[in-house]
Amino acid sequence: MSVRGEMAAVRLRPTICEAVEKAAASLDFTGVRALRVLLHAGASAYWPLVKAEPAKQARAYEATAHQLVERWDGQTECVADPKASALFREMDSEAASFLALCADRSGTQWLEPVDAIATYAVSVLQGTVLRWLADCNDETTLVVLDDLVSSLATRAVEV
């Protein structure tokens, strides 16, 4: 989110992992159906954290955008911004850990490299949060999160 690390300081993983573990303990089935339940549990744990501090979320986007404007001002060569790209790599890593946990607990495996799937998920979530900050439309957000879960579940098979 922010190149200054505001969101990096908020570790979402423990909250999300607890939700996944609790959901996994209640399941009496495995496979892609279980994976969907666990992915939903994680998304359901993530979203209230975002909604709890909208100003902090907006400041994180603002800081990132400001850093990128300064980086691109007067530059035409496409070179990654080290701070912003490092932050996205951290978010991708957290998402990959979440996806690996869900696959492990559901008895599934990803059909694509988990890092690539994580990058996709983070990109969708970044856009979703920014959209929600603009319109506060919870219904749209829930539809997008549900679609994300559905999309992710198509990228896994039962082992």
Image (cartoon, rainbow, N blue to C red):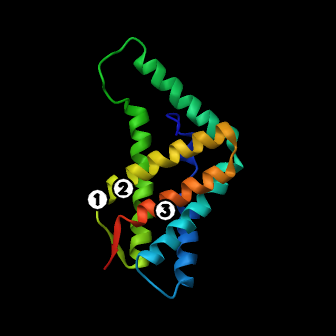
**57 sits to left or right of 96:** right
Residue 70 is tagged as: none
Determine the secondary structure under disc 1: loop
Camera-side residue of 123 and 62: 123
Camera-side residue of 114 and 157: 157
Q: What residue type is labelled 1?
A: Pro
The image quadrant of residue 59 is: top right
Q: Which amino acid does label 3 sit on?
A: Val
Residue at image position (48%, 48%) is 124
Residue at image position (53%, 36%) is 2
Q: What is the C-alpha distance between the residues marked 1 and 3? A: 17 Å
Question: Which numbered disc flags the more N-terminal residue, 2 or 3?
Answer: 2
**137 sits to left or right of 65:** right
The image quadrant of residue 99 is: bottom left
Determine the secondary structure under disc 2: helix
Residue at image position (49%, 62%) is 149
Q: Which of marks 2 and 3 is in front?
A: 3
Q: Position of residue 135 (x, y in %)?
A: 68, 39
The image shows a total of numbered marks equal to 3
Q: Mark 1 points at which residue?
A: 113
Determine the secondary structure under disc 3: helix
Q: Where is residue 126 in the image (x, y as percent from the top left)?
A: 51, 44
Hey, which residue is sitting farthest top in the picture? Answer: 74
Q: Where is residue 29 in the image (x, y as percent from the top left)?
A: 47, 86
Specify the quadrant that holds the C terminus. bottom left
Q: Which of marks 1 and 3 is in front?
A: 3
Q: Name the residue under label 3.
A: 149
Question: Which numbered disc flags the more N-terminal residue, 1 or 3?
Answer: 1
Residue at image position (35%, 69%) is 156
Q: Name the residue under label 2.
A: 117
CB contact under 8 Å: marks 1 and 3: no
CB contact under 8 Å: marks 1 and 2: yes
